[in-house]
Image: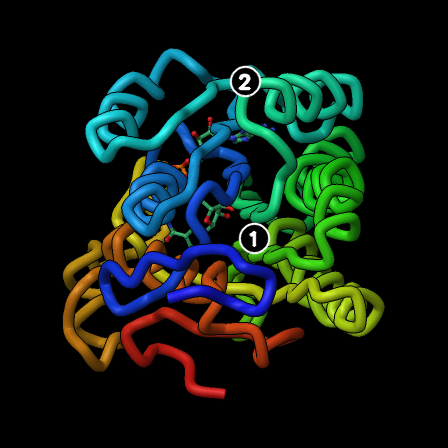
């Protein structure tokens, strides 16, 4: 199938992604980000993994290569404009102009509200909110030039429901949702969509690091609060992101696609 710009589309998984589209996935080295890398590669994208921990990215790199796609790994702290600038240049040189950006990197600390220091507040804002802002500013020019782009931000159900002992985290993720809507309005006429996916209780190292916040254990939490009666898996989020990154989602922008087993419906 050929689209209006003459690009050949791929229909694997029933979701079309342009061939040779280049996708940046921040925090793509493991967890949800790694699954997103694999799903985008399966749908025809070459992948740039921007992660500050490149040591754990080996297996996702092998998976992407096994799918026949190119991959580049850049050591990036998303709160550093210098790192992002260097990674943008490397990605363009190795893979070409960037058409898809998934702002997934994030930290999810837990602390009593009264104990959150200025330093910790700044750290969480710098990574989760300013990192999203910086990465998007760095790559959006390619999308504007191509008159096509897909930006998908990973927010959090904590921004929809609230989450005690995660006030700083939830506030940054609420900012990511507002960022999504505001930027979506600004760039929609340029052929660029901006959406967000708020995960909930997806079984990753990130979730394991806050496992003690569930007094009845994760299974107890699942039984009480998740209608589909299971934890989320990274692939649940990756499926939604792959759709929002595809040709098929061109009439969807500024939206929140909740992937949470029915925990929050709104
Ligand atoms: N797992 C969940 O249940 C859940 C729920 C809600 C939201 N989220 C969000 O989903 C995203 C991914 O979460 P996960 O559970 O896969 O986490 P994870 O901790 O398993 O993986 C996060 C990845 O991001 C990278 N990263 C972290 N900070 C970075 C930085 N400053 N610069 C570059 N890379 C950085 C890490 O090295 C790692 O590879 C996060 O934004 C998180 O807030 C996760």
Q: Residue at x 77, y 38 (%)?
A: 134
Whether residue 44 is visible: yes
Q: Mark 1 points at which residue?
A: 166
Q: Could you tell me which residue is drawn at 57 percent across and 48 percent down? A: 100
Label 1 or label 2, whichever comes before in sequence order = 2
Circle 2: element type: strand
Query: Residue farthest to the top?
Result: 55
Image height of 211 relative to 216, above or below: above
Name which quarter of the figure residue 2 lies in. bottom left
Residue located 51% across and 41% down the image: 23
Residue lying furthest bottom: 266
Residue at 29 percent across and 17 percent down: it is 58
Q: In this view, does 112 lie above or below 82?
A: below
Q: Residue 212, relative to residue 254: is it above or below?
A: above
Mark 1 neighbour class, 10 Å CA radius: few under 14, some 14 to 19, many 20 or more = some
Gap between marks 1 and 2, in whole Å? 29 Å
Residue 91 in picture, x, y percent from top left? 60, 24
Q: Which colour scheme is used?
A: rainbow
Residue 15 in the image, given as x and y percentages of width and height: 33, 66
Front in this rendered view, residue 246 or 232: 246
Residue 231: quarter of image? bottom left
Q: Image check: 152 left or right of 13?
A: right
Quadrant in which the N terminus appears: bottom left
The answer to whether 83 appears left or right of 228 in the picture is right
Q: Position of residue 171 (x, y in %)?
A: 68, 58
Which residue is under mark 2? 74
């Amino acid at each position: 199938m050929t689209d209006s710009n003459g690009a050949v589309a791929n229909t694997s998984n029933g979701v079309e992604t342009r061939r040779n589209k280049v996708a940046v996935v921040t925090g793509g080295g493991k967890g949800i980000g790694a699954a997103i890398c694999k799903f985008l590669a399966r749908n025809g994208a070459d992948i740039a993994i921007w992660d500050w921990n490149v040591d754990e990215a080996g297996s996702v790199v092998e998976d992407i290569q096994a799918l026949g796609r190119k991959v580049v790994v850049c050591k990036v702290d998303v709160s550093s404009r210098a790192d992002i600038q260097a990674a943008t240049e490397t990605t363009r040189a190795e893979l070409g102009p960037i058409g898809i950006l998934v702002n997934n990197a994030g930290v999810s600390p837990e602390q009593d509200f009264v104990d959150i220091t200025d330093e910790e507040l700044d750290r969480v804002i710098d990574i989760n909110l300013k990192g999203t802002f910086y990465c998007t500013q760095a790559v959006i020019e390619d999308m504007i030039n191509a008159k096509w782009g897909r930006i998908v931000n990973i927010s959090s159900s904590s921004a929809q429901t609230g989450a005690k002992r995660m006030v700083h985290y939830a506030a940054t993720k609420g900012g990511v949702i507002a960022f999504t809507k505001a930027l979506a309005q600004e760039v929609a006429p340029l052929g660029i969509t901006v959406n967000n996916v708020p995960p909930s209780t997806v079984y990753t190292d990130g979730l394991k690091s806050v496992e003690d916040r569930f007094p009845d254990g994760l299974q107890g939490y699942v039984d009480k609060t998740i209608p589909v009666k299971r934890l989320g898996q990274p692939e649940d989020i990756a499926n939604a992101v792959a759709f929002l990154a595809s040709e098929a989602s061109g009439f969807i922008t500024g939206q929140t696609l909740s992937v949470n087993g029915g925990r929050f419906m709104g």
